[in-house]
Amino acid sequence: MADWNPELYNRFRRYREEPFLAILERLRLRGEESIIDLGCGSGENTVELARRVPRGCAVGIDSSAAMIEAANKVLEGVEGEVRERLSFQLADIATFNSAGEHSREYSVVFSNAALQWVPGHREIFQHILDALTPGGRVVAQMPKNDQETAQITILALAAEPPWKELLAKVTVPSRAVPGPERYNQLLPELGFTEVDCYEHVFQHPMDSPREVVDWSRATTLRPFLNALPADKHAAFIDAVAQRLTRAYGTAGPLIFPFRRLFIWGRRPAK
């Protein structure tokens, strides 16, 4: 799969940071926590977490070399005291702690809009539990927007000629994410306590359906574009934009609703 484009991803950072800000309102930190950010992207959220633990530390991991490069550039501009307690590493979150190398190491395991790309969530959350110190917390957020107009439209287009020959088996990442009821059942089965999983819909004003396409190009459309030859990318993107204009009933401003799943849990203190 082609590497991520940090610049395109961060074009809508004001919207992408809304779930992170919602997490910060609830995540009470004492200041000495050790934090790992799974799927840290370009690192801005990891930096903010590090700032909030002046006696602790934070590390961000991501499987994208482009994102880690961008994160390290962000790190260069961070105040020295925070920079000393913060690092970024190129690593696959799908195999995080699979060998138990981080057993009981972190007091907070954080993940924002990353785990939807990784299969096998029972195994992942087991590894997260094993990596937490006694009393440590997990908080994860994943998009769950596969029933919104844009993603329904993309899937419908991909199932039609001339695209279906190459795209029939491709789907949107949110399709792999169960609802909150599944995680409310799964995490206690693994041994988590204080489990609280729920959905929240954020409302994002967009100037046009084309902006929704640009948002999607950074994330949802990646599997589709990766399955297409490069010389067909522009035609597919144009087709998505035309379909969305009809589906939303406007070529102008609109509200783009985005549903996200939040997952909270704690490793028992004993």
Image (spheres, rainbow, N blue to C red):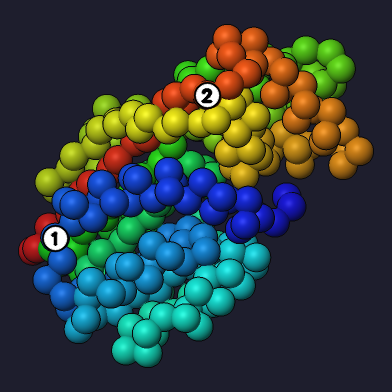
Residue situated in front as seen by the camera: 5 or 161: 5
Count residues near mark 2 (Cα–Cα under 10 Å), then give few for <14, some for 14-19, many for 20+. Answer: some
Residue 106: percent from left, percent from top = 28, 70
The residue indicated by pointer 1 is 28
Residue situated in front as seen by the camera: 44 or 268: 44
Q: In the rendered view, tell whether residue 89 sits above or below residue 152.
A: below
What amino acid is at disc 1?
A: Arg
Tell me the distance, in whole angstroms, between the alpha carbons under discs 1 and 2: 37 Å
* Residue occupying the point 12% across, 46% down: 194
Q: Is residue 158 visible?
A: no
Q: In the rendered view, tell whether residue 136 sits above or below residue 120.
A: below
Tell me if 145 is positioned left or right of 20 in this view.
Answer: right
The secondary structure type at the circle numbered 2 is: loop
The residue indicated by pointer 2 is 253
Tell me if 175 is positioned left or right of 232 in this view.
Answer: left
Q: Are marks 1 and 2 in contact (CB under 8 Å)?
A: no
Q: Is residue 12 visible?
A: yes
First reached walking from the N terminus: tag 1 or tag 2: 1
Q: Can you name the residue that lies furthest to the left here? A: 270
Residue 235: percent from left, percent from top = 84, 28
Q: Which mark is residue 108?
A: none
The secondary structure type at the circle numbered 1 is: loop
Residue 195: percent from left, percent from top = 17, 43
Q: Nearer the viewer, mark 1 or mark 2?
A: 2
The quadrant of the rendering that contains the C terminus is bottom left
Count residues near mark 1 (Cα–Cα under 10 Å), then give few for <14, some for 14-19, many for 20+. Answer: few
Residue 233: percent from left, percent from top = 82, 36
* Residue occupying the point 43% across, 60% down: 38
* Residue occupying the point 35% across, 45% down: 18
Q: How many marks?
A: 2
